[in-house]
Amino acid sequence: MLVISRRIGESFVIGDNIIATVVDITGEKVVLGVDAPKEVPIERLEAAEKSAGNRRAHGRRKPPK
């Protein structure tokens, strides 16, 4: 895992086409903005895990299109 430090307004790049920017920091809460192509799915980890669990429960591996 890469750990980096950023301040409000500073960004970092993931790959060639994803930019994440620190929008706000309040206490222990960090708000990030993510700029990525539409075809790149972005989900909070807990939501992605819940979706994967629901798909497994219904016998599907990928979400329906």
Image: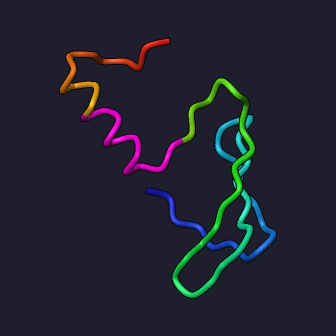
Tell me where the magenta segment starts and ends, as one range: 43-53
> In the rendering, at what x and y percent does residue 61 appear?
30, 18
Give the dominant element type of the magenta stretch: helix, strand or loop.
helix
> In the rendering, at what x and y percent does residue 60 appear?
27, 16
Which quadrant of the rendered structure holds the N terminus? bottom left
Asked if the magenta segment contains residue 50, the reply would be yes
Quarter assignment of residue 36: top right
Name the one closer to the observer, 59 or 28.
59
The structure residue drawn at horizontal position 21% and vertical position 25%, both measured from the top left corner, is: 56
Asked if the magenta segment contains residue 35, the reply would be no
Residue positioned most to the right: 9
Quarter assignment of residue 27: bottom right
Residue 39 vertical placement versus 19 (above, below): above
The structure residue drawn at horizontal position 71% and vertical position 66%, both measured from the top left corner, is: 22
The structure residue drawn at horizontal position 66% and vertical position 38%, both measured from the top left corner, is: 15
Residue 39 vertical placement versus 1 (above, below): above
Residue 41 vertical placement versus 6 (above, below): above
The structure residue drawn at horizontal position 65% and vertical position 79%, both measured from the top left corner, is: 25
> In the rendering, at what x and y percent does residue 39 appear?
65, 24
- Left or right, 64 with reference to 58: right
Number of numbered discs overlaid on the protein picture: 0
User: Which color mode does the image show?
Assistant: rainbow
- Left or right, 29 with reference to 18: left
Residue 23 vertical placement versus 20 (above, below): below
